[in-house]
Amino acid sequence: MLSMRRSAQLGLVVSCLILFFALSVLAVQARQNYLPGTLPPAELGAAFHLRGPDGSSVASQQFRGRTTVLYFTSLRCPVTQEYNQRMSELARRYAGNAEVAFVAIECADASAGDVTRDAHAAGRTFPTALDPSGGVARAYGVRVTPTLVILDPAGMVRYHGAFDDDRNAAQAQQQYCDEAIRYVLRGRQPTVSSTQAFGCRINGTPK
């Protein structure tokens, strides 16, 4: 009886060792698929299909193949209003680059007319999608506006967080969003890939 028990224990140990070895081999193979400094595996961004204030379709699939900047915004958030100009200026800087796309995702439950007027006042020239239920925001783990999410051409999340490191533009020292875009365009993982966004809580999201 004791011999059978020892045999079972030995078999379990051997099985665990085999499993560990197999997982180690798979891990090494996964690392070999990515050259040093290039983009490692990341979480696939949630697919979405929303409507713009003019009724047009705004879907994640439209931007696949480009570095895509999702700007989660709210026309009722004073912090977001302070960042609108910075965001529009950044988008204009990349306007001539076909490899980069910007999309504003409006999280406030507002009329199409109000959203259109807000986008115009902000100088926004890129598409705006309506997400009044906050479904897309929740899918991306966005709890406050403004929050930036940057996807690589394959739709993988490469940055999630704040636009920069200070609400006062004159005092901002780290341009997280701009730096992340430049890294992804070079096929590299951003040095800073996640920061704490600050602003106004989206209704229905947990604290």
Image: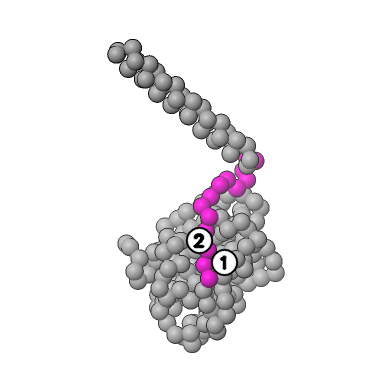
Tell me residue 9's x, y (percent): 36, 20
Residue 182 visible to an observer of this rendering: no
Q: Residue 71 carries which label?
A: none
Q: The C terminus lies in which quarter of the figure?
A: bottom left
Label 1 residue SS: helix
Residue 160 visible to an observer of this rendering: yes
Q: Tell me whether circle 1 and circle 2 mark residues in contact (CB < 8 Å).
A: yes
User: What residue is rendered at 47% in x and 29% in y?
Assistant: 19
Which residue is at the far top?
A: 3
Amino acid type at mark 2: Ala
Main SS, magenta region, reads loop
Amino acid type at mark 1: Ser
Q: Nearer the viewer, residue 84 or 58?
A: 58
User: What residue is rendered at 38% in x and 16% in y?
Assistant: 7
Q: Which of 26 and 152 is in front in this view?
A: 26
Which residue is at the far bottom?
A: 113
Q: Which range is magenta? A: 35-49
Above or below, comparing residue 120 to residue 140 in the picture: below
Q: Which of 160 and 182 is in front in this view?
A: 160
Tell me residue 113's x, y (percent): 49, 87
The residue identified by callout 2 is 46
User: What residue is rendered at 52% in x and 82% in y?
Assistant: 53
* CA separation in Å, label 1 and label 2: 8 Å
Tell me residue 194's x, y (percent): 47, 54
Q: Residue 60 carries which label?
A: 1
Q: The N terminus lies in which quarter of the figure?
A: top left
Dot 1, how many residues are within 10 Å of its Cα: few (below 14), some (14-19), or many (20+)? Answer: some
Label 2 residue SS: loop
